[in-house]
Amino acid sequence: MIAPIVAAVLLGSPAHASACCVGSVSDQPAQLGRCEKFGAALAAGSAVELGSFDGAGRWGPTSDGWAESTMTLGVGARWARWGSAALSLPGVLNVKGAPGVSSVGGGLGDVALTARIEPWEEGGGPRPAFALGVIAPTGRAWAASEAPLGADVTGAGHWSPLAGVALERTGATWPWRLGVEGTLAIGGDPTNPPGVDGGTVIASASLGRYLGSRWTVTGALSGRVEASAGGIAARPALDLRLIHGLPGRWRAWLGAGSDLPILGRSAHGEARLGAGVLVVK
């Protein structure tokens, strides 16, 4: 799935910056800076299957294939300089295939509500940041699927509380972030395929570069581990992003990434593209 674990568009994944305070375009473009009170974002992304890891960690092609596209609307607000909240509503389109059969489906995905806490200002060094939230089962679950290959499945079918913690340095020419985020399935369905129910943890490290006041580039390495009754699945990934905008007004971004064919286990690998725009006030 191409949606990040903290699904709310305005609370973000690797790398964050208080854009309007430092006078540069944020290296986490879909996240509100400390001086920004409100934001609305529209993001689109697509992913295609590259291959998969077997239980022994060997990488290879798969006989079936899939592609997924999402369009996510997000709104966020900052209630204090140390805290903000966001709501995201994703729409999902799936295209799946196997020898002799193909299927297309989609609909509303799982809605996420998240809050981000920044207990103190950055100053001359890094600072911690925390995220708390919940993902609601508003999408179609596997148990309700009617399409071949589950192409109409758009959600996990269970509630998922989420939490994250990060150490980040955003006010320097080379902003960076180290973070860990996780979710836990509550009320899963025993008919779900392996890996849908259980817990997920993503660890990430990112580094960016401000190019004047209107351009930023970032790169991030991450590792995703999913634990369920079916076992443990893991996959590493590399993602790159280019951001352009007007500090304190708007920003747009284009990103590309891929799961890496190394150090994985019992997981599908994907390549992805994404773009979005955020208007802030």
Image: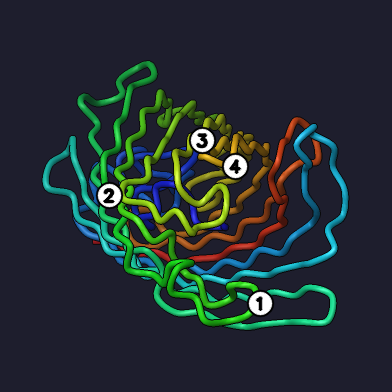
The residue pinned by badge 3 equals 202
- Whichever of callouts 4 and 1 sits on the residue coming sooner in the sequence is 1
Q: Position of residue 271 (x, y in %)?
A: 72, 56
**Disc 2 target residue:** 134
Residue placed at 53% from the left, 44% from the top? 212
Q: Crowding near pointer 1: few (<14 within 10 Å), some, many (20+)?
A: some
Q: Marks 1 and 2, how far apart in space?
A: 27 Å
Q: Earlier in the sequence, mark 1 or mark 2?
A: 1
User: Which label lies toward us, 3 or 1?
Assistant: 1
Residue 66: horizontal and vertical position, in percent? 71, 68
- Give the secondary structure at mark 1: strand
Left or right side of 44 for 97: right
Would you say residue 173 is visible in this rendering? no
Proximity of marks 4 and 1: CB atoms separated by less than 8 Å? no
CA gap between label 4 and label 3 equals: 18 Å
Looking at marks 3 and 1 on the same chain, the residue that comes earlier in the sequence is marked by 1
Mark number, residue 156 = none
Q: Is residue 26 left or right of residue 253?
A: left
Find numbered disc 4 in the image and state the secondary structure of the residue it sits on.
strand
Lower sequence index among marks 3 and 2: 2
Q: Which residue is mark 1?
A: 95
